[in-house]
Image: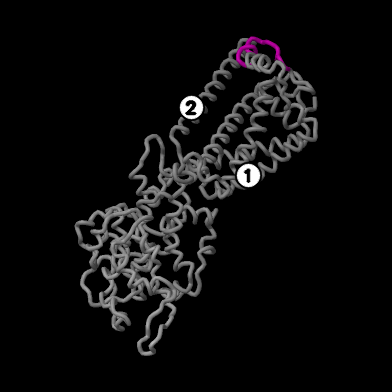
Amino acid sequence: MYLYPKWLRIWHLMNALLFIILIVTGLSMQYTDLDNSMYVVGFAKAVKWHNYAAFILTANYVVFILGNAFTKNGIYYRIKRENFWPDLMKQLRYYSFGMFKGEKHPFPVTEDRKFNPLQKVSYVLAMYLGMPLLIISGFVLLFPEVAIDNVFGMSGLVLNDILHIATGFFLSIFMIIHIYTCTLGAKPSSLFWGMISGYHRSEDH
Amino acid sequence: MDLRKLPVALLIILICSSTAGYSKPMWLKASRAVKQDTSTYVSPFREENENCLKCHGQEKYEYTNENLGRQVKELMCSQRIVNRDLFYQSNHKSFSCTDCHSTQYETFPHPGELRMEQKYNCLDCHGGDEKFAQYHFEEIDSEYQQSTHYKLEEDGFTCWKCHNPHSYKISIRNTENLKETITYDNAICLNCHSNFDHFKLLSDREEINVLSTHKWLPNQAVHFQNVRCIECHTKINNDILVAHLIKPKAEAVRRCNECHSQNSILMATLYKFQSKEQRRDGFFNGIILNQSYVIGANRNEFLNLTSFGILLAILAVIAVHIFFRIRKSNQTL
């Protein structure tokens, strides 16, 4: 079943590459040391590449928002209140126990349901909460003159920095889990191929 | 007198005005002045000083020319003007003018030969004084003599070029607003390095442009607002609070990591005083964390450990999941 249109696959690939660049350069900036000037990338290069990648990521995010606003892809991200927690638990139970007992997937992928409840919640949190926070706090770091000077006795920039780093960290954790869950298809590689070809194999999770 | 306010006060005695006909300045007399808050401070010599400041305290002054038999208005030379407000907020606020200047200035017109008198430098009054040993004035002087500014001494470079004795106030040691202190301290450098009229008195260079020479610096304006020039342009000296060995241009700090790292040199420069006073447990570079934002130097040990723990937990869950997947796969086979 053709689930991943070309724009989405290009966006997804760009997002993945940019995120890897941002994680590597972000860690390099955060953990530079006087004695070891190269953590992974030198500080000056890390700053430059982090800024470039961030700008492209922001543009890419706009593509995602517009794509979801004007194509069918947006409906996959709509969360319904009805059975929200039971469905979430059902999916969690499947990942924790059911799949090892040979149970059937409680929410198989269809053209109307690309994501299972856990995926949907985590993607919505990542894309509609995490990404805006990351982008806005990143721009404040890039243009620190817009930051609030003092928030409850602490530098507004420091709080913004903590927000940026914490959001980046949680999105990085999301990425690790995302990559792992993508090995849960019929074969460990099939979901990855689906994201390249655009076709999802129905027996995949 | 507040001892914390002394070291730089001792650095600064006299500028511009000539001196003659007096012995060692009577700063001991001044030291008896009661320590008071700057905003409410009233000098015990206020009235006495007013004899000088009624002319030297503003751009215009008046006097009676007895030859002409009338009042004459003149413009005061800008180099001879002392701003009352700044003076009474400065380190020397408790001084009488004649503590440092000759009592012969009390007569008007001032005797012409006063102009030719040698001015004091800081060590003339405070050098070799055990009372101020903790401030290492001799070390400061030794640093100055190795600094790139010292080679300009024959052209007239002295302590007073940076530390105006009529307005300088100690800043980094007792600051409550670090940004204001940074601006204040940087203005001292920029007084010559961005003012060609002042600069050309000491150098033959045909132009100065701080902005273009620092073009390589990312977020230039942010750096200028948040660190002092001397952070990069002096050699760190752990014995004195403010390093005075200005390095040649080629030796200035250019590696980002020097500041942007856990062992940031800012802890030995800009935040030296506060880091000694207010070191906090559990935080790397706690002072930087609380005062400002320096990528690479802002590290919170608690957040580091927490994030590392979360990462390990996630990897552990994944590893367990993989284990059960492999086991199920083997059972199926």
x and y percent of residue B252 in the render?
Answer: 43, 59
Q: Nearer the viewer, residue B274 or A176?
A: B274
Which residue is pictured at 60% across the width and 15% down the height?
Answer: A96
Q: Residue B102 has which mark?
A: none
Q: Can you say which quadrant of the picture contains the C terminus of chain A?
A: top right
Dot 2 corresponds to which residue? B309
Q: Amino acid at mark 1?
A: Ala
Determine which quarter of the picture holds residue B59.
Answer: bottom left
Which residue is pictured at 44% across the width and 78% down the height?
Answer: B75
B62 shown above or below A63: below
- Element assignment for label 2: helix
Determine which quarter of the picture holds residue B45.
Answer: bottom left
Q: How many badges with numbers are in the image?
A: 2
Q: Residue A53 has which mark?
A: 1
Marks 1 and 2 in Cβ contact (< 8 Å)? no
Left or right? Give the position of A44 relative to B253.
Answer: right
Q: Amino acid at mark 2?
A: Gly
x and y percent of residue A204 in the render?
Answer: 72, 20
Q: Residues within 10 Å of mark 1 (few under 14, many from 20)?
A: many
